[in-house]
Image: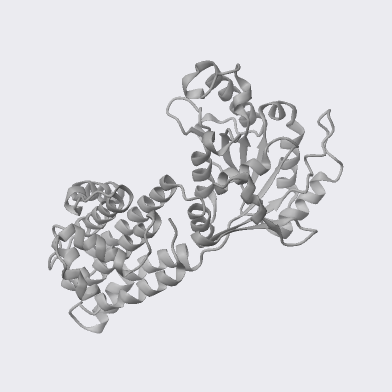
Amino acid sequence: MAIDPDKFRNLREDLDDIVELAPGDSGAEDLIMDTVLGKALRETEELVEESRPPRMYVFGRSGAGKSSLINALANRQAADIGAVKPETVESELYHIEFPNRYSSWDIVDSRGLFESATPGGDLPENTKKFMKQDVKEYKPDILLHVITPDQARAGEDDFAAVKDMREELDQPFPPILYVVNKVDQLGNLGEWPPEEHESLAGDIKEVLDFVAQVTERVDEAEMHPFTDNQPLHGYKFDCAEYVGIVPVHLQTKENYWNVEILSQLIGDFLPADARLQFMQAQQRQELMRDMSRDLTKRFSLIGAGVGAAPTSAADIAPLTAMQLLLVGLIGGFSCEEIEKDTVEDYVTSMCGTTAAAFGFRGLARGLVQFVPGLGSAISGAVAGGGTYAVGHSAEKYFFDDTVQKPSVFLGEGKEYIKEIIN
């Protein structure tokens, strides 16, 4: 589940062959290139070419489980943490490499600032000073405050310190995500998982509500539970300052609990250029499927703009090129190489023909054959809905090994476009 930037560049160059299929003068070609393929390429170049390691600042008191959190997010056994090496003695900036996934992460250790709190809960005098220096120097994308249920109750000073830092710092402060670890300790012995024990689920909700209150996120209209009708799996906030609160259980890899929701929430709040390396490093299929669906929706809206362009048959070439690019990216998000052969495999499976072997022009002609409605006059609903259908068909093919032609999803795609536009 990883995209090789070099292979992406090769695929992007191959797409130029398709645009040459477009009839008309060069002015029309430039227009449709900018309207359709140009926008799609800018989307993917930001995602792939400009990709960088996410930088996460992890802090919390002793025993909260900061190392376990990083291992769980990285989806590695604890023994693998030997691959983490400090960049400098002073900064404690750690760089985690995922060489087979074309990814890396930067983790900033909090230098034990909160770990040295007194038994009574008081923080060391210089805690805020040093943490402000860290935030200024390392400019993390997100802060992960790791706490246990007991520490949440006793750690109001911790929350207040972070609030004070936000108000005092003379630069944008990163969003904060509260991670409540060891929630299994809330219930009675043997009460696990919380989905099967109502009392434990209620205890988890009580802790999450308490954290929301002490961080002043008490407006229920801004708190959205991940689980319908109850926040068993945490809250997401409508707030740029606080990401949300997520409960987790990180004792062993075999029984991690709620880590995928935590990963998804972090990914949602990371800058766009840091998202790909964070997601694909973990090799969690559902995370990469979510990225596929998000890309499908964005490409669909770009395709819908075709109907507004003052061109005709020329629209098909860049639209088809964009759809083939979408297929290649979804293949890369699953487990395939992002290259022409991956796209060809999909097209030939849909068409039941080997015409794609003639190169990308053959792939484009093959794609047009099974996207209903692509003709000399393309409406925005057909262009956008057809792109949506191709994306969902490719998702089924690469993630589920199921052949479902785009025509199956065309009606759903048109409805999605109409709903967004209207």
x, y percentage for residue 102? 51, 62
- Looking at the image, which residue is at 87% across and 42% down? 125
Q: Residue at x 20, y 53 (%)?
A: 406
In the rendered image, residue 366, in percent from the top left (x then y), is placed at 17, 66
Who is closer to the viewer here, 305 or 179?
A: 179
Residue 398, image x and y in percent?
Answer: 31, 53
For residue 241, say whether it is visible. no
Report the front residue among 252 and 121: 252
Residue 211, image x, y percentages: 64, 30
> Which residue is farthest front?
79
What colour-coding does the image apply? one colour
* Residue that protrudes farthest toward the right in the picture: 125
Relative to the observer, which residue lies in front, 401 or 208? 401
Left/right of residue 311 with respect to residue 192 in the rendered view:
left
Residue 52 in view: yes
Q: Quadrant of residue 341?
A: bottom left
Residue at x-position 28% and y-position 46%: 419
Q: Quadrant of the N terminus?
A: bottom left
Tell me which corner region of the image, top left, top right, bottom left or bottom right, holds residue 86.
bottom right
Q: Is 102 placed left or right of 92 in the picture?
A: left
Q: Residue at x 73, y 57 (%)?
A: 136
In this view, which residue lies farthest toward the bottom?
Answer: 26
Q: Is residue 101 above or below residue 251?
A: below
How many numbered circles are shown? 0
